[in-house]
Every structure is written in C-alpha cells, then in structure tokens.
Image: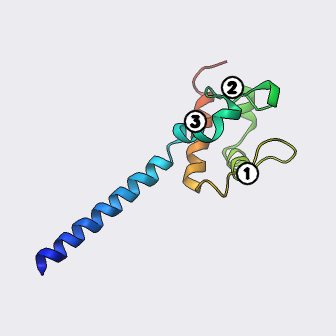
Amino acid sequence: MRIVLNRLVVVAACCLVCAGLSMAADSDGAALFKSKCSMCHGADGKGYAAVKTPDFTDAKWQASMTDKKIADTIKNGKPNTMMMPFGNQLSDADIQALVKQIRSFGSSGKK
C-alpha cells in the first residue's frame, strides 16, 4: 500500500511540474509576440505604417509609454484602432511577458 501511495505522490508531483512548465512556456514573450502580435506589429516590432501600428523600436514611443499603459492596451485594446483586446485570451503573466518583449525592442539599438 505504501508503494502505491508513494507512486501516486510521484505521479502527482510530475503532473504539477509539467503543468508549471506548460504555463511558463505560455508566458514566453517572444513566442507570444510572434503568435499574437507580429502580424500587425511586425516580427521586428517596427510596425506597419499602412495600418498605423507603432514602431516599438522607436525611443520616443518607448519613452512615451508606461508598462501599465502597454499592459492595459494589450488587455483592453485601443479604441478607434485595429488593436483588439486580448484580455480574454491571455493571462496576466502572458501580458507581462509581452510588455517585457515590447520593451526589449527599444533596448536593442534598432532604429
């Protein structure tokens, strides 16, 4: 009986670890950006003038936005633009991973 209980504990622990790894993978900012954002904002974060998406590599844009404002825009969208809300599709951890990814475009020295 003890062996069965020990094995159940091991299996349960493995399940929890796998679930944690899955959630961590979901919060990979680069992968999320690629799958959710790049079609409108470009893989390099420079945006597309034709659809009026911002250039995340622009130092002025980066300076004008707080992390809170970026997160709010991801979560709730931006009125009168094509930016739709993603709050029902992404967790708070996913949104924070995207904020970090968007900030990384500004620190990469791209112009």
Mark before the other along the chain sequence, 3 or 2: 3
What residue appears at the point 76 percent right and 35 percent down from the top-left corner?
Answer: 64
Q: x%, y% of residue 75?
A: 69, 52
What residue appears at the point 67 percent right and 55 percent down from the top-left corner?
Answer: 87
Tell me how far mark 1 sits from mark 2, CA to CA: 20 Å
Q: Is residue 23 left or right of residue 60?
A: left
18 or 110, which lies in front? 18
The three-letter code of the residue at mark 3 reads Lys
What residue appears at the point 53 percent right and 36 percent down from the top-left corner?
Answer: 30
> Disc 2 on helix, strand or loop?
loop
Tell me how far mark 3 sits from mark 2, CA to CA: 13 Å
Task: Tell me, for residue 34, which label it has, or none.
Answer: 3
- Residue placed under numbered mark 1 in the picture: 85
Local crowd at mark 1 within 10 Å, few (<14), some, or many (≥20)? some
Q: x%, y% of residue 77?
A: 76, 49
- Residue placed under numbered mark 2 in the picture: 46
